[in-house]
Amino acid sequence: MSPKPPRQARLAPIKRGFRHGLLGLSILFLAVHLMGLGHSLIPVHGTLNMILRPDGTELRREWVPIERISPHLIYAVIAAEDSRFCQHIGIDFDALNVALEDNKSGGRRRGGSTLTQQIAKNVFLWNGGGYARKAVEAWFALYIDTVWSKRRIMEVYLNVAEWGDGIFGAQAAAHARFGKPASDLTPREAALLAAVLPSPNKWRVNPPGSYVQGRASTLQQRARVVSQERLASCVIK
């Protein structure tokens, strides 16, 4: 029976693997950091949702600066998707706790996902569940909220959000649904666009069904509150 190699020799492969693992994580972190910094300054040219759109539909999108997007759409999106957008740090822990309690009690299921988390998923990750992906999404959301301004977060969101039929971004959606640029959207048109955001390939803007019509009316009222109470002050001065 041959003698065992010295303990130091037995541990050498483990140490090398650990060092290689740390190096790989460091490179990944640096790449993510550079990507995040880049997206804070330049347009986001594509996402996995755009690449993997259903049925191979034609991609329609046009990046526009936030100055060319109607404030009515900003108010409506905050009203629909993230009323505490200007207050939270990328994750709305209050909304998350409410969502968890509602889900535990068997009430209407809530996601508690912020606009920042949706950007983390759409720009850096992929659709789907799983605790591992959710954990990475949460880290990205906190990172984005630290590196990007709230105005930039809203600008990216409105340019990568999906509005069905291969349409991404407010400009393409406004042209396709209403035949006008995003800067000219009325409060009603903005509310209709915001109303379908949770399921853009299921709910229609034109013609809107009774559910979308009712939801848009509710969002119009909420959008007025967002404007009056300056809940979008981190985006619109």
Image (cartoon, helix red, strand yellow):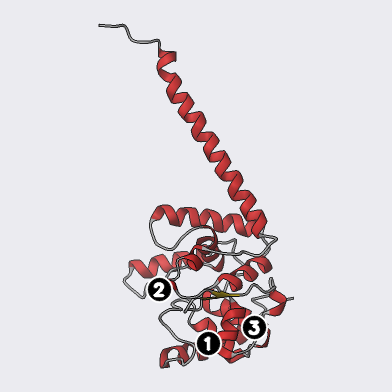
User: In which quadrant will I find the N terminus?
Assistant: top left
Q: CA distance from mark 2 to mark 3?
A: 26 Å
Q: Residue drawn at (44%, 14%), measured in percent from left and top?
A: 8
Residue 6 vertical position relative to residue 192 in the rendered view, above or below: above
Q: For mark 2, what is the residue? A: 55
Identify the residue under disc 3.
182
Camera-nearest label, 2 or 3: 2
- Residue type marked 1: Leu
- The CA distance from mark 2 to mark 1 is 24 Å
**Front label number (1 vs 3):** 3
Q: In the displayed structure, would residue 208 be above or below residue 226?
A: below
Which residue is under mark 1? 192
Left or right: 38, with 204 as reference point: right
Q: Is residue 132 left or right of residue 224?
A: left
Helix, strand or loop at mark 1: helix
Q: Amino acid at mark 2?
A: Asp
